[in-house]
Image: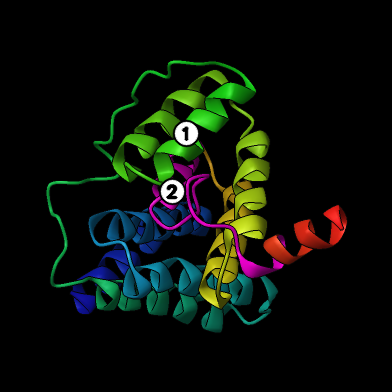
Amino acid sequence: SSNEASDKVVELVNAGVAPASLFDAFRDAAGELLMRAPGILSLHATTFTNAVHYAWQHCGDAETRKLLLLQNAAFLPLYRSDRQNREIGIDTLEPAPLKTSGSAALDEIFADVSRDRLGAARKVLAYLKDHPDPQAFATAARRMIFLKGHDSHDYKFSSAVFEDWQTMASPWRERFLAASVFYLKGSGDADNELAQRTRTALSS
């Protein structure tokens, strides 16, 4: 519940846990909500946490910063869907072997995003184990958004993910990125109208 989540934050802060660790937990909790019930409700857990973290970074008042931590914790349960799949856990997700390597591995992952998001998430974990710097994955994912994003939610969700992973610690960073494929675009998704118009203009 919201009260239980807030109480846990108070307990952890009083025990000396760093706010950065709490934000890692918030982000991965948001990622798990997305994995369990992908959609418009759960994606906002990620974008909300991104916004709260921005406010926390730029606020100079210590009491307000503490309230932001409590607010983030309290709001996350509100993004839980009634149709969630409780069998999926972000902390129990296991890597799945890739059939390819290098840039081809990214092609494999984003092909799977369009047909098997859980399988793609598991392959992301395997890919990031062999490629500890997530920048290539983030670049490939961003390219998919530019080609196939259709509304503001595609853009704001991906922007939050690609901003937040850079402040996270392993192994939670990798699990957060793996969960993101439950709302990112895959190579099998239709190109957006702008991409289609651009190709037409360049070929004429």
Task: Residue under label 2, please give it.
Answer: 181
Q: Which residues are magenta?
A: 170-195
How far across and how far down the image is residue 155, in percent?
A: 60, 68
Residue for point 36% across, 61% down: 30
How far across and how far down the image is residue 15, in percent?
A: 36, 55
Question: Which numbered circle lies on residue 92?
Answer: none
Please report whichever mark, 1 or 2, sits nearer to the chain's N-terminal start.
1
User: Are circles 1 and 2 on residues that touch, CB within 8 Å?
Assistant: yes
Residue for point 37% across, 18% down: 97
Q: Nearer the viewer, mark 1 or mark 2?
A: 1
Please tell me whether residue 201 is drawn above or below residue 79 in the rendered image: above
Question: Which numbered circle lies on residue 109?
Answer: 1
Amino acid residing under circle 1: Ile
Left or right placement of residue 33 versus residue 157 in this view: left
Q: Secondary structure at mark 1?
A: helix
Residue for point 84% across, 62% down: 201
53 vs 112, nearest the viewer: 112
Please tell me whether residue 101 is drawn above or below residue 118 in the rendered image: above
Residue for point 34% across, 66% down: 9
For the C terminus, give its image quadrant: bottom right
Residue 1 appears in which quarter of the rendering?
A: bottom left
Residue 54 appears in which quarter of the rendering?
A: bottom right
5 vs 43, nearest the viewer: 43
Amino acid residing under circle 2: Val
Please tell me whether residue 104 is drawn above or below residue 184 in the rendered image: above
Q: Is residue 174 magenta?
A: yes
